[in-house]
Image (cartoon, grey):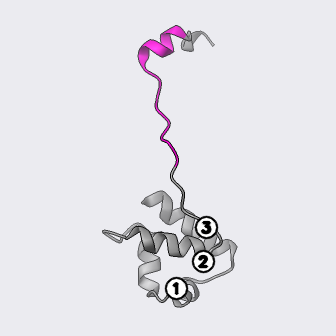
Amino acid sequence: MEAIGRTIKNLRKQKGLSQSELASQLGMSRSTISGIENNTVPEIGIRKVEAILNMLGYTLTAVAQRRRPTLDQLKEANFHEQ
């Protein structure tokens, strides 16, 4: 959630919006926006995150996680010799 909060903060600032302005447009409190941006909200619903991102002109997407290579794969690729 920390990365989402940072992203929301950066996008909000790029749009030139204060936390209060964004919160007002979304029908949320400024403290909710602040808590999301600063990762101090214990839980936040996916719908809130989606609404915030949509208001900022972005969408929420899921992407496959990158898996780290195994030790055997690194050995096969001679990782340390590159």
Q: Residues within 10 Å of mark 2 (few under 14, many from 20)?
A: some
- The residue to which callout 3 is attached is 10
Circle 3/circle 2 CB separation < 8 Å: no
N-terminal of the two: label 1 or label 3? Answer: 3
Q: Residues within 10 Å of mark 1 (few under 14, many from 20)?
A: some
Answer with the quarter of the image where residue 35 lies: bottom left
Residue type (three-letter) at the residue carrying disc 1 = Leu
Q: What residue range appears in magenta?
A: 63-76
Residue type (three-letter) at the residue carrying disc 3 = Asn
N-terminal of the two: label 2 or label 1? Answer: 1
- Residue 17 in percent (x, y) is at 64, 82
Q: Secondary structure at mark 1?
A: helix
Q: Secondary structure at mark 3?
A: helix
Task: Report the side of 16 relative to 64 (left or right).
Answer: right
- The residue to which callout 2 is attached is 55
Q: Is residue 19 above or below residue 63?
A: below
**Quadrant for the C terminus in the image:** top right
| In the foreground, 51 or 76 | 51
- The residue to which callout 1 is attached is 26
Q: CA distance from mark 1 to mark 3?
A: 17 Å
- Residue 59 in percent (x, y) is at 59, 65
Residue type (three-letter) at the residue carrying disc 2 = Met
Residue sitting at 53 percent across and 88 percent down? 20
| In the foreground, 80 or 66 | 66
Residue sitting at 52 percent across and 85 percent down? 26
Mark in the foreground, 1 or 3: 1
Rendered image: mark on residue 2: none
Q: Secondary structure at mark 2?
A: helix
Circle 2/circle 1 CB separation < 8 Å: yes
- Residue 67 in percent (x, y) is at 46, 32
Residue sitting at 38 percent across and 70 percent down? 45
